[in-house]
Image: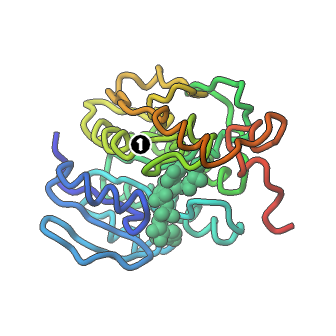
Amino acid sequence: MKLKRLLITGAAGGLGRLARARLGHVAETIRLSDLSEMEPAGPNEEVMRCDLGDFDAVRAVVDGCDGILHLGGVSVENTFDAIRNGNLTGLYNTYEAARQTGCKRILFASSNHAIGFHTRETKLDADAAFAPDSLYGVSKVFGEAVALLYHDKFGIETARVRIGSCFPEPKDHRMLATWLSPDDFVRLVEAVFRAPRLGCPVIYGASANAETWWDNSAAGYVGWVPQDSSEPFRAKLDAAMTPPAPGDPVNRYQGGAFAASGHFED
Ligand code: NAI
Ligand code: 15L
């Protein structure tokens, strides 16, 4: 089923630019939104700048969309004030605007940092307890909770995708386990907006890596089957850097440096 209009928030960011380049076929019209400047609209595109913290602006951006790829917000650890606007107020504004305007399907870019304080020996599935490793991770827990509320109360379906590390290639040894290839990201978005029934699943956003901490079997019905693996990058990483020692907190927790670093305001 092709959407009429897909809204991509965070369209000026890394994943937003990837989605813009690769996912135009998902909807008749792609509406692109970000706080930052974006390239002018191409064919079948609309560009609308907005601060997710401004409800009236968000409502105008969401109005007329039957799907949202919600990538916008602060994407790493930051001060509480910075996180609050984009990831708490902005997240709520997006869901409330979706409810008011009748948009029924969202892919929420959650993060592995919602569960980053689990050790790497702990295999996690969709029922794993939250273990945020940062204020950023806490904001993703909030987002997943709002998504669940709006599903159970108002029937808005969301894929709560705990993205690992989506970059052209893994940047360190941890990312051999957390890497999500750009192609698998594209396949995931396609599957989420194609699925006849979505519900509100938790999906771990990682490729078919040899080392994995995450079990996606509960979300198999969505139809996403990652195809890529980080393994071909292992030798390059081994040659480029020494992995942290086994006892190093960076190595102990799934969230890596996010879990290992002290409070950012210390
Ligand atoms: P990014 O930082 O490159 O892009 C985020 C975009 O959101 C930026 O263009 C920024 O201007 C925009 N934004 C921030 N605050 C905003 C506000 N108040 N109003 C409107 N727009 C605002 O991040 P990236 O890597 O593209 O990630 C996209 C999403 O996926 C983020 O939500 C991030 O938390 C999540 N994610 C990404 C991962 C990755 O490996 N790239 C891993 C886990 C989660
Ligand atoms: C994230 O949530 C960040 O958005 C991304 O920049 C990476 O740091 C990623 O997690 C990761 O854990 O590698």
Q: Position of residue 44 (x, y in %)?
A: 14, 64
Label 1: element kind? loop
Question: Of all residues shown, which one is farthest toward the top?
Answer: 217
- Dot 1: within a 10 Å radius of its alpha carbon, few (fewer than 14), some, or many (20 or more) residues? many
In this picture, residue 24 sits left or right of residue 39? left
The amino acid at mark 1 is Ser
Q: Position of residue 255 (x, y in %)?
A: 68, 43
* The N terminus - image quarter: top left
In this picture, residue 218 sits left or right of residue 82? left
Q: Residue at x 27, y 32 (%)?
A: 195
User: Would residue 52 be seen by someone viewing this image from the given angle?
Assistant: no
Image height of 248 relative to 127, above or below: below
Q: Nearer the viewer, residue 216 or 144?
A: 216
User: Dot 1 corresponds to which residue?
Assistant: 181
Ligand 1 neighbours mark 1 (CB distance < 8 Å): no
Q: Position of residue 88 (x, y in %)?
A: 59, 61
Image height of 152 relative to 143, above or below: above
Image height of 96 relative to 218, above or below: below
Q: Nearer the viewer, residue 51 or 266?
A: 266
